[in-house]
Every structure is written in C-alpha cells, then in structure tokens.
Amino acid sequence: MNKQLDLGKLAAQSVSAFDQRPHAIVIGSGFGGLAAAVRLGARGYRVTILEKLDAPGGRAYVYRQDGFTFDAGPTIITAPFLLEELWALCGRRLSDDVDLRPMDPFFRIRFDDGKTFDYSGDRERNIQQIRAFNEADAAGYLNYLKASEQRYRVGFERLGFKSFDSIWQLLRFLPQLIRLRSDRSVYSLVAKHIKDPYLRQVMSFHPLLIGGNPFSVTGIYSLISHLEQSFGVWSAMGGTGSLVDGFTKLIESQGSEIHYNTEVQRITTDGRRVTGVALQGGRELQADIVVSNADSAWTYRYLLPESQRKRWTNRRLENAAYSNGLYVWYFGTKRQYPDVPHHSVLLGPRYKGLLNDIFKRKTLSDDFSLYLHRPTATDASLAPEGCDTFYALVPVPHLDAGVDWSEHAEPFRKEVEKRLADTVLPGLSENLATSRVMTPLDFQDRLNSFKGAGFSFEPRISQSAWFRPHNRSEDFDGLYLVGAGTHPGAGIPGVISSARVLDEVVPHANPVRHG
C-alpha cells in the first residue's frame, strides 16, 4: 500500500506512550533498506522507512506501461538463502510470498561473430562447450572453480558479514588476502587457468554485474562463480518487483511503516550525534538511529554538513573511483522471440578496450556490449498475450564522461535497437509496442546516485572492505549505511549482506521472537 507521509500522525507516534521501542529511520527502500528494516524490526526497533519515489524498490522499482511490466534494475537473484534468513526472522518462509524459479541456462553469452556459450549450473554441459572452444581449458575450468571456491570461503563466508570498523579487522584477514593474491584482478585469475580468449570473457564478465571492471576489480570477486554454481541463478515470478512486495509485507507485519513521496533533505545532527532527518519542506523527524540506504557518496556529500566530515570530505568523494553508468532501454514487442532465453549477454568486438573506454577514458563507444533481459521466457504474465517484455542494459561511462544524455538518449537507443535487430531480435523495429529509457542522468536525478554511477564506488581493492564507507559511520554516531556503496558492495547478495552487518554494529534492542 503506497502511503503518503502523515507528519501529524508520525509526530504523534514518536512520542506515543504506547510504543517505547527505540526509533530507527531508514532512508530509502532499496533491497539494502528493506533488509535493514526487517533486521531492525526483528531486534525490537520501531522502523520508519522514508522513500523519495512513489513506490518501493529503489533501483528495483517497477515500471508498468501499456500492459507490460518492467523490472527497472536487478533481475538476477543469487544466494536465496540470504532471503530465506530474513523471512525466518519474521516467522515466515520465503516461499510463502515469493515464487523463485531456477534459470537454465544462467546466461547465454553471444560473441560478436555469432558464436554462443550457454553458461549454466550443469558442470558437464559447461565442460562439453569448453572443449568445443579449447580442449585443454576443460581442466583449467575445474581449477578455476577451485580457486573461486577458495575466495568464496574467505570473501563471502568470512569477510562478507564483518563490519570492518577498524584497520585491525582488515589486518586480521590480510594474510589470507595476500595468500589469495587479492591484488590481482578477476581477469588475471581467470587467465591463469583459461587460455582461450572467448572462454576468458565467459568466466570473467561477472564483475560487470556489480559495477566492476574485470581487469581492475580484486580477484576476490571471482567468488561469484562459486556462488552461482553452488546455489544457482533464480528469477522471481511476477518479476523482481514481487520480491520487493514480499519485503513490504514482512515490514508491515512487524508494525513498521514505509512512507512514499517523502524525500530527506538532510540528516540532522547535534555535534557528532545524529538526531534524525529533515524532510524537503523543512519538517524534522527524530530518531535514535538513522540508517541510510541512499547512495553512500550522495549521503555524505549532500545529506551531511562538510564541516563535520573528517574522512568523507567533498574532495575525497570527488576523487574516488566510481562504477560505470548504465543505459537501460525498456521495450515491449508485438510478437514473441521464443529462441531468446531469460538472460543473454551480447558481447561486442572488443573486450578490454571497451572496458578501458568505460572505466578509464570515460568515452561512449559505438561497439558496446549489452545484457538483454527477456523475463517473459519464464513468466508470460509480464506482457500482453502474444507479446514479449525486454530490457537492454548497456554499461556506459558515468556522468564524468560529459555525455549530454538529454540529447543523446534517443540516438543511442536507435543504435541499441539496430544491434538487437541485426543479431537476436529480427524485425524488432516494426514490432515495437512500447518503449522507455533510463540513462546515468536519471540515476543521478531520480535515484540520487553520485555522478550517475550505477553501482556507487567501483569495487577495486583500494575501495573494498575497510577502504569503503563503513556500515557504521566513521564521522557520525548513530548513523549507519547499507547498500551498494558500503561493505561488502553491490548486487542483491551484497546489499542484503550489508544489512546483516548491522546486527554487529547497531546497539541492541529487545528482539521480537516468533514461534
């Protein structure tokens, strides 16, 4: 239920003699904020979520247009056990509210020359395809999976839920990180075991799903391969938005509230102590703690006074390295394309050179690669009968590139349309039924993403763990951060794990027990 903020009611609740639970305000209802609200509610907090948009989800917002349903952002669900844990905290099962379906293949990777690789959880099928490219790489693939598992055991199981509040926590894990050569990139690790250039792309593209350049992001992120192979890749019936809806039901069942069309102008402070928030329009709400699911760079740059920031100064924020931007074209077709799977990756003729253009040179290239999402391959309800729902997501530079997206959005859309029509969607132009686009400019203006970056800080080793904005603010008492821009990073598992870290750093409240 979309709920406008009733300030009078909310103010009355804040002084109510009937609810003496400590009050937590959560800024933003992305997956990180939703997971944080569930955890805080389970620990005895009275939680109020304040959302700028008219519906929940943040980057996982849902667009409905001309009978088509579009997930705005996240479409790939891994590590479902993290979701099951949150539902269990509320005495429920994930399957009570969300119907997850396994993907097979996980992705179809299409190379520029038309060759394809169906990457799946079936190891033998993967090996058969690998042998068709390079017989010797079959053994190398198995060795790479072992290396990925080693990094999963350290990076996910041991580091993923730690707060990294102090440098000593980092130093404690440093010997293991050195042993695993975490200074080397994901691509370097893949190249150590895989020799075929096609297969190197198949095994190394995953960091792009969390805003990282495979040639510079720490090799710890190769853990994604083990995560996928062990726990699968899933999609939710009804779209990822159905998972967001499930979260809102959990939160409301805890007695917490979500208020939409409610933008936070600043976080209020008394010295180092956070006291609440001030809304657009000037009204202030008091809280015992504030959890920001807003982009962490945006939180520090625009919601907190620079005079009180010692670590995350404006200069430091401006000079940090940020993830790529995203250009997303949502479209529906009047016909269906049954040969196109749920998830496809269409690679252009260049790999490293294109990534250098995006992450280093900050230039927009016309030989782009893209991810194509066709959810109607699994769930026909997301489009009118006989139609298909799609989105094409193209990694592009963030706003430092200086691209005028207000002028370039439509010409670039036409380039994407032509690429798709020439490859996997013949006859696309004459079969378009509906269309909309989202550019890095929209990420900045609509989602308050610093520099329009799709995934906040780039997850290179110098911006990971202790070097990333901490889950417990370094500069302000009572302020906590969740989401892509804090530890452990972007992606649904990452942002949900950032909320799990709160259990370690947020002051204790009386837990709510079920069962």
Image (spheres, grey):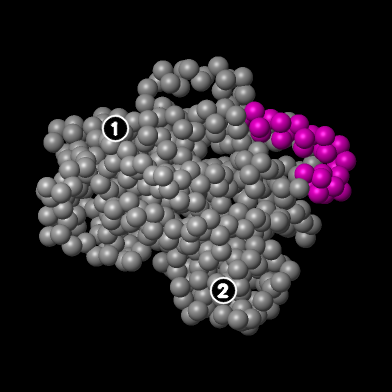
* Placement of 216 over or under 333, stated as above or below: above
Name which residue lies at 33% across and 56% down: 252
Q: CA distance from mark 1 to mark 2?
A: 44 Å
Q: Quadrant of residue 118?
A: bottom right
Q: Is residue 450 visible?
A: no
Residue 508 numbered mark, or none: 1
- Stretch of the chain drawn in magenta: 123-151
Name which residue lies at 43% across and 21% down: 169
Magenta stretch: residue 423 in it? no
How packed is label 1: few (under 14 Cα within 10 Å), some, or many (20 or more)?
few
Q: Is residue 152 visible?
A: yes
Residue 381 numbered mark, or none: 2
Q: Give, as a three-letter code, the residue at label 2.
A: Ser
Residue 57 appears left or right of 472: right
Q: Give, as a three-letter code, the residue at label 1.
A: His
How packed is label 2: few (under 14 Cα within 10 Å), some, or many (20 or more)?
some
Residue 379 percent coordinates (x, y): 60, 68
Residue 198 numbered mark, or none: none
The image quadrant where one finds the C terminus is: top left
Residue 334 percent coordinates (x, y): 61, 81
Q: Nearer the viewer, mark 1 or mark 2?
A: 1
* Placement of 183 over or under 226, stated as above or below: above
Give the structural element (helix, strand or loop) at label 2.
helix
Name which residue lies at 56% across and 60% down: 99
The image quadrant where one finds the N terminus is: bottom left
Q: Main secondary structure of the magenta part?
A: helix
Magenta stretch: residue 132 in it? yes
Give the structural element (helix, strand or loop) at label 1.
loop
Q: Earlier in the sequence, mark 1 or mark 2?
A: 2
Residue 267 percent coordinates (x, y): 21, 45
